[in-house]
Amino acid sequence: MRNITISLEEPLTQTYMAHAALLAVKLLALSPIAAFTWVNKGLFPNTDIIRRAYLSELKNLAPFWIVGALYVTTGPSVPLGKTLIRAYTISRVCVVLGYATKPIPALISDLALITSYFINSYMSVCVIYKYKDCLYRFVSFNTFKLVSGSVRCQNVGVHWIVHSSIASLNNI
């Protein structure tokens, strides 16, 4: 297996780190932004809306931070990687604006949420596809084979004697 190095000089790595930091700042600024908006409108803050906004952001940002860092290691094209990272950041900002300040229609906020979900999913599939050989090794490590009355775990050499009917196992 080859070594994977992540250079901080790479434009994609810098884009990921800058946008990950922007998303973290956005998460921290969510409560003051919502409070400021509600004070200006003369509304009493609804703490349940802030709580839901935080939960939504945490559920969506944590996978992005992990999958985004792994995606950078797959060696994608720089323009595609930058576009995905930037689109994710813009979509999450739209979602928060829909939650906290409501200056955008709900349809746009919902489309932004779906966009961020698909970007995370695409990057996850790219990571899995790039490192699929590791998955094959894991699956083959844990596969079992019926051999002459005992079950053998391939690649490990552990044997279990099957006390139940071997014939019923062979018929499956």
Image (spheres, rainbow, N blue to C red):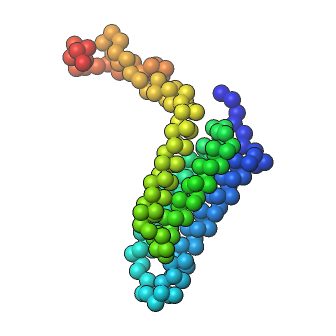
- Say if 27 sits above or below 120 in the image: below
Q: How far across and down, in percent of the image, does residue 33 sit? A: 55, 77
Q: Which residue is situated farthest in the bottom direction here?
A: 42
119 is higher (above) or lower (below) than 167: below
Task: Tell me residue 54's x, y (percent).
Answer: 47, 68
Identity of the residue drawn at 49% across and 53% down? 115
In the depicted structure, whether residue 10 falls above or below residue 171: below
Whether residue 52 is situated above or below residue 136 in the rendered picture: below
Residue ID at (59%, 49%): 84
- The residue nearer to you, when weighing 101 against 105, is 105
Depth check, front residue: 110 or 122:
110
Residue at the extreme right of the image, as rendered? 9
Quadrant the C terminus occupies: top left
Q: Is residue 63 visible?
A: yes
Residue shown at 48% from the left, 58% from the top: 112
Query: What residue is at 53 percent from the left and 36 percent from the top?
Result: 128
Where residue 158 appears, as percent x and y from the top left, is 43, 21
Please indicate, yes or no, whether residue 166 appears anywhere in the rendered image.
Answer: no
